[in-house]
């Protein structure tokens, strides 16, 4: 039973706790978390400094999210204790953590698509007046929160109508609606555009001025250097180092994260073959008017890596989903190796050599209740190597293929039969990539393939994209990171307002051109 909050007190949207106690607000002593076959955290002593932005960084599987889940009451330690203001506390549920003033914004969206924005902000935390939810009060408070986040959306809008980046801002608004002393942000900018990231940073500064402590996890190193006050590094489930951000550099961070395993990516141009995919005049009308895609034409060749850059809402995801058949275009043609595809269903295109790694791995890339192995092989179950006439799936070739893919993508897992939810976010993303590659595609679309992935794992993905091109595959990926697009692509397509505004060879690409072409204009 959720605790009822009275709306008569008229609280501010952002908490304003009093500064008290010493410099450390949260401390863990000897905390470990053990899962079957995996030690996620090993005897960790971790400190969170009061009224600071406490950056926590490490490779995928380093234990960052596990630590945050324990502080937020989602998980409980296998051993050790958590101190809040110097006193031991038991955080056995999110409700209990919130009573102590600790809220979390999860890396993966934890929202209800079929409910309104307002209901998502206040669910389980409603304001009551005379035994009933005060809808008018909640509406005004939700509107105020959204305005502070510069999100121009009516609170009564169904959440499912918003883009992922806007849904992320709703998640942030929900955390800010509570009386928060410590706010945990786990990859809060992974789905945000650059302008939205700036808004979030302004909100963080407001929160600091009001005495709120921030724990901030991100794999974007420049972002951490800009927003962070104090940095802590985890590696392989253990505490490695802590330091003031002003005293460290990006090379120090990378070295602390990966130790002697630091990897480098060297671009190598693959030999280009014939055209494998062509699209002419693709047009997709937006449900609210206007265009999601506006007369888009492109060609992909064997061995070519094409990067797609654009701001949130530019049409990158819509382009990928239209090419692979998940969205039906209103006009235009699609050709794969000379075959017309625009009227073919998704399953047909998958079978004939097209594969997609979606941006939203949780909603579209994985089935949470199933194992790592089953998630990895879902799209290739009809492969002749796995089936023999109408007999059940043959475990031996399936197991061998899964084992090979785990090694190739450096996926951290002790047993492929464990639930996919037992993995870190970055390793889950690698499972989604593996699922696409196991269909033996000719064309691979990767929509933000490195979202939520650490530096070392990013390099693994970069090498994988390069290897696919060397093998003659046509690769098309989208990214909101300029440096990533410039580092990986043979050719860069820029999109704005559903149109291709630039198509640049690698030698002609620079930051100014990409930024200028990505800015929507009449």
Image (cartoon, rainbow, N blue to C red):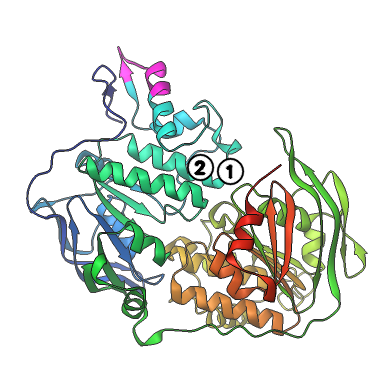
Single out the residue that lies furthest toward the bottom: 260
Q: CA distance from mark 2 to mark 1?
A: 6 Å
Q: Is residue 451 above or below residue 20?
A: below
Secondary structure beneath dot 1 equals loop
Q: How many marks?
A: 2
Q: Is residue 26 above or below residue 143?
A: below
Return the residue nearer the eye: 167 or 123.
Answer: 167
Q: Is residue 44 visible?
A: yes
**Location of residue 76 by image quarter:** bottom left
Pointers 2 and 1 in contact (C-beta within 8 Å): yes
Image spot of residue 433 (x, y percent):
60, 69
Image spot of residue 133 (x, y percent):
37, 19
The residue pinned by badge 2 equals 167
Q: Which part of the image, by quadrant, shows the C terminus?
A: top right
Single out the residue that lies furthest toward the top: 130
Task: State which region is magenta.
Answer: 128-140
Secondary structure beneath dot 2 equals helix
Return the residue nearer the eye: 351 or 228.
Answer: 228
Tell me if mark 1 has few (under 14), some (14-19) or many (20+) residues whose alpha carbon lies within 10 angstroms of its own.
few
Could you tell whether 108 is left or right of 489 in the image? Answer: left
Q: Which part of the image, by quadrant, shows the N terminus?
A: top left
């Amino acid at each position: 039973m959720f605790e009822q909050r009275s709306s008569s007190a008229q609280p501010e949207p952002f908490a304003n706790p009093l500064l008290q106690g010493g410099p450390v607000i949260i401390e863990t002593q000897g905390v470990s978390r053990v899962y079957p076959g995996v030690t996620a955290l090993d005897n960790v002593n971790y400190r969170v400094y009061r009224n600071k932005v406490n950056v926590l960084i490490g490779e995928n599987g380093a234990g960052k999210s596990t630590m945050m889940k324990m502080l937020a009451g989602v998980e409980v330690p296998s051993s050790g204790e958590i101190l809040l203001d110097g006193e031991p506390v038991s955080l056995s549920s999110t409700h209990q953590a919130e009573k102590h003033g600790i809220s979390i914004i999860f890396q993966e969206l934890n929202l209800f698509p079929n409910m309104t924005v307002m209901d998502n902000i206040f669910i389980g935390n409603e304001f009551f007046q005379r035994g009933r939810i005060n809808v008018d009060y909640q509406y005004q408070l939700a509107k105020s929160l959204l305005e502070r986040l510069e999100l121009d959306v009516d609170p009564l809008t169904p959440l499912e109508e918003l883009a992922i980046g806007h849904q992320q801002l709703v998640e942030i608004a929900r955390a800010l609606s509570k009386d928060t002393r410590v706010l945990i942000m786990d990859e809060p900018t992974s789905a945000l555009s650059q302008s939205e990231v700036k808004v979030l940073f302004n909100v963080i500064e407001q929160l600091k001025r009001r005495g709120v402590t921030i724990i901030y996890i991100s794999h974007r190193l420049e972002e951490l250097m800009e927003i962070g006050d104090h940095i802590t590094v985890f590696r392989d489930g253990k505490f490695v180092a802590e330091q003031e951000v002003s005293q460290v550099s990006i090379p120090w961070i990378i070295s602390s994260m990966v130790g002697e395993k630091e990897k480098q990516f060297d671009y190598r141009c693959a030999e280009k073959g014939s055209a494998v995919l062509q699209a002419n005049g693709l047009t997709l009308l937006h449900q609210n008017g206007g265009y999601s895609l506006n007369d888009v034409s492109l060609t992909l060749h064997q061995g070519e890596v094409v990067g797609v850059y654009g701001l949130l809402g530019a049409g990158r995801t819509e382009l990928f989903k239209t090419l692979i058949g998940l969205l039906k275009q209103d006009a235009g043609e699609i050709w794969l190796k000379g075959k017309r595809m625009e009227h073919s269903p998704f399953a047909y295109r998958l079978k004939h050599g097209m594969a997609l790694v979606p941006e939203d791995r949780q909603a579209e890339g994985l089935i949470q209740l199933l194992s790592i192995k089953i998630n990895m092989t879902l799209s290739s179950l009809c492969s002749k190597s796995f089936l023999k006439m109408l007999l059940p799936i043959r475990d031996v070739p399936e197991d061998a293929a899964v084992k090979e893919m785990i090694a190739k993508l450096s996926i951290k897992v002790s047993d492929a039969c464990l639930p996919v939810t037992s993995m870190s976010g970055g390793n889950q993303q690698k499972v989604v990539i593996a699922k696409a590659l196991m269909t033996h595609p000719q064309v691979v679309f990767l929509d933000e393939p490195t979202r939520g992935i650490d530096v070392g794992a990013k390099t693994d993905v970069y090498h994988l994209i390069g290897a696919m091109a060397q093998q003659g595959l046509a690769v098309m990926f989208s990214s909101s990171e300029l440096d990533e697009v410039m580092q990986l692509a043979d050719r860069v397509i820029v999109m704005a307002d559903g149109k291709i505004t630039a198509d640049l060879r690698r030698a002609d690409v620079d930051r100014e051109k990409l930024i200028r072409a990505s800015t929507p204009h009449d």
